[in-house]
Amino acid sequence: MKVKCPTCQTDVVWSQESKYRPFCSKKCQLIDLGEWASEEKVISTPAQTPSPEEIDIEEIEAMLAQQQDDFFKH
């Protein structure tokens, strides 16, 4: 399968041998990283923290009760 490099749009074979996939090269990988670091790229929707009214404590307790007893013993 081939994908386009997100930076330069070159075709990249998607395989174990493609060291920088989905990028075509280390250069394109670093360009992309720099764009994120300088905030040229951002996630469009800010993360939303639920308000205390939206948190269902009983639901959380029920999920925790379903965990195996040895969950924290490793």
Image (spheres, rainbow, N blue to C red):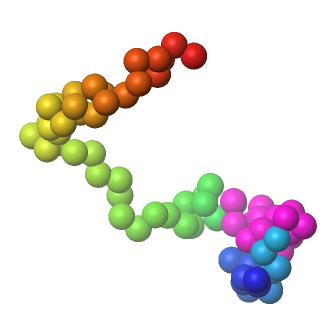
The stretch in magenta equals 16-33
* Quadrant assignment, res 41: bottom right
Find residue 74 and report its horizontal and vertical position in percent: 57, 16
Q: What number of labels is visible? A: 0
14, 43: nearer the viewer: 14
Residue 26 appears anywhere in the view: no
Q: In this image, 12 relative to 54: left or right? A: right
Q: In this image, 7 relative to 44: left or right? A: right
Residue 70 appears anywhere in the view: yes
Q: Is residue 21 magenta?
A: yes
Find residue 65 and report its horizontal and vertical position in percent: 28, 25
Q: In this image, 7 relative to 19: left or right? A: left
**For the N terminus, which image quadrant?**
bottom right
**Identity of the residue drawn at 35% across and 53% down:** 47
**Identity of the residue drawn at 41% across and 24% down:** 68
Determine the residue located farthest toward the right in the rendered image. 17
Determine the residue located farthest toward the top in the rendered image. 73
Q: In this image, 40 relative to 27: left or right? A: left
